Image: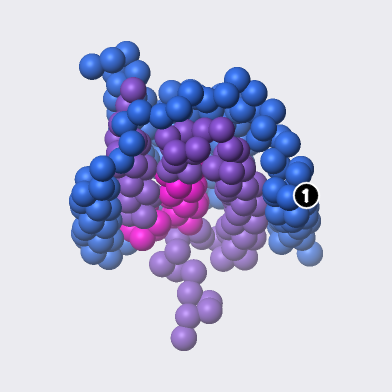
Chain colours: A blue, B purple
Amino acid sequence: MTVQQVLFLLFGAIAVGAAVGMVTARKVFHAALWMLLAFFGVAGLYVLLEAPFFAAAQLFVYMGAIGVLIIYAIMLTRGMMRQRLPRVNDQWWFAGLLAAVFLGVLAWLVWQHPWATTAAAVPGDSLNRLGLTLVDPEGFALPFEVASVLLVMALIGAVTIVRER
Amino acid sequence: MVPLQWYLILAAALFCIGLYAVLARRNAIAILMGVELMLNAVNINLVAFWRYTEPAAATGQAFAAFVYAVAAAEVAVGLALIVSIYRNRETVDVDEINLLKW
């Protein structure tokens, strides 16, 4: 095994283990902390995939922004934290069965196909190319602008929804 | 180098764990966390396919960037809805939020 494979198994184990911790945690605040650890594992995978921009964005956007937002929401709904409700609903066994079967089908499908085991080197200016593609009229300039409009609309919508009346 | 299918199977595992969280958890915030996990799994797939098939083009990375933007919008609106529901109904247990159920 190469160093990369060992690191993949390490970060993958962090991500999957933390994700399992997230769905099994009794308190939703603990689930949020597990979720942050899972995001950290995914950031490590981005480093292995030689996508440093996404590793940094994973830390800033997911662990930073989305993590803080979710912890804020948990604290704003604090009455829920004190109650000792069962953490899953009545259909948890069916949900678990469905997820397990879906995972089995996906794993079987992936295993069938001879995927690439090697890849061409990432060009040194890959971040430069990503930025140019995002603002290139022949590339993704229109979706890029639509995404910014979507973010502004989400911001205004969120403020409108939670405003006291 | 790590074979591509390792990434695909890992992403499938994360997706299915998130699916279980969405279908089985009672707390609406925990459901939203499951959705975030599913989006993350999709992003791993996008970046892995970019890395192994077309690293010279930036298309896969551009798609992953859009997933980030949509995830940020989704979590902002979703949490706003949850906080608003909590104000009105004093609960975020999705089993008790049944105003729109026939």
Q: Quadrant of residue A91?
A: bottom left
Report the magenta stretch's main SS.
helix
Q: Decide if residue B60 is in sight here.
A: yes
Provide residue B1's location: percent of width, then percent of height.
34, 23
- The image position of residue B73, as x and y in percent, is 65, 51
Boundaries of the magenta span: B21-43
B85 shown above or below B98: above
- The residue at 47%/52% (across/down) is B35
Q: Amino acid at mark 1?
A: Pro
Q: Residues within 10 Å of mark 1 (few under 14, many from 20)?
A: few
Q: Quadrant of the C terminus of chain A?
A: bottom right
Q: Chain of mark 1?
A: A
Side of A24 where A29 appears, left or right? right
Q: How many marks?
A: 1
**Rendering coords of residue A49 (x, y %):** 45, 27
Residue at x 45%, y 27% (from the top left corner): A120
Q: Is residue B40 magenta?
A: yes
| Quarter holding residue A67 | top right
Q: Position of residue A14 (x, y in %)?
A: 34, 27
SS at badge 1: loop
Q: Is residue A92 magenta?
A: no
- Report if residue A60 is visible in the image: no
Residue shown at the point (53%, 77%) measured from the top left = B99
Q: Nearer the viewer, residue A68 or A47?
A: A47
Q: Which residue is mark 1?
A: A137
Which residue is situated farthest in the bottom direction here? Answer: B102
